[in-house]
Image (spheres, grey):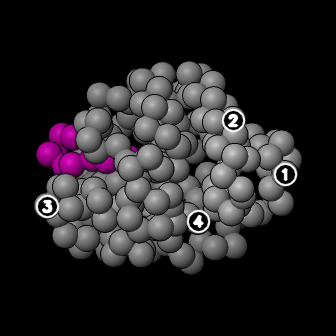
Amino acid sequence: MHLRDRTHWIFDMDGTLTVPMHDFAWLHRTLDVPEGDDILATIATRPAERAAADHAFINQWEEDVARRARPQDDAVALLDALVARGNTLGILTRNTLEGARLTLEAAGLARYFATADIVSRDCAPPKPHPGGGEKLLRQWGAVASAAVLVGDWVYDAQAGRAAGTATVLVMRHGPMPWADEADLLVDTLWDLTRSLG
């Protein structure tokens, strides 16, 4: 896989471009979701009133965390390199659109992404569903073979693969039992920046 040939780059946000700050273990306990289960998928099965309350709680929690966001040390160099090449950049996140906007602003990364190119769970089914990636490709008029999805978690790789893009996992969390879900594994975004050289 030659990343130099990829002209459309879709990024996960939290943990990939920004320093992870979400305490998901705490959120699982607080919302009574078994550890390892998908929080959003679990909430979707609950009665409407409880689901609405859970979503409101998550939205507020995400926005509180978003305001403290910081960029990963290796993010800006890669984004600068891609912009210099004239590549198209997008965000695919399981957060809300407002949470994504706040995160990118706080981390100093908003300048790299047009608002229309930020796809959240408000705009498409959350990852690992391919709908968000497919939405970006449609609005860009791009084919999947021109795109790559970069993330740090299994849902990112699964969403990219299902949408037909190349997939890169940044090994932010150490060894991953599902690492074979991705086309390429890298230790840091610096590895991707160097590969464009």
Viewer-side residue, 183 vs 129: 129
* Numbered disc in front, either 3 or 4: 3
Tell me whether circle 3 and circle 2 mark residues in contact (CB < 8 Å): no
Q: Position of residue 14 (x, y in %)?
A: 55, 42
* Numbered disc in front, either 3 or 2: 2
Viewer-side residue, 45 vs 69: 45
Residue position for label 1: 32
- The kind of secondary structure element at disc 2 is helix
Q: Position of residue 15 (x, y in %)?
A: 57, 45
**Left or right relative to 95: residue 78:** left
Magenta-colored span: 83-91
What amino acid type should be assigned to the residue bearing mark 4? Val
Closer to the chain start, of discs 3 and 1, is 1
- The kind of secondary structure element at disc 4 is helix
Would residue 87 be counted in the magenta stretch?
yes
Would residue 159 be counted in the magenta stretch?
no
User: Looking at the image, which residue is at 36% across and 72% down?
Assistant: 163
Residue position for label 2: 57
Res. 89 in view: yes
Using the image, tell me which numbered label, if any, was put on residue 141. Answer: 3
The image quadrant that residue 80 belongs to is top left
CA gap, disc 1 to disc 2? 13 Å
What amino acid type should be assigned to the residue bearing mark 2? Phe
Res. 3 in view: no
Closer to the chain start, of discs 1 and 2, is 1
- In the figure, 131 relative to 172: above or below? below
Residue position for label 4: 154
* Numbered disc in front, either 4 or 1: 1
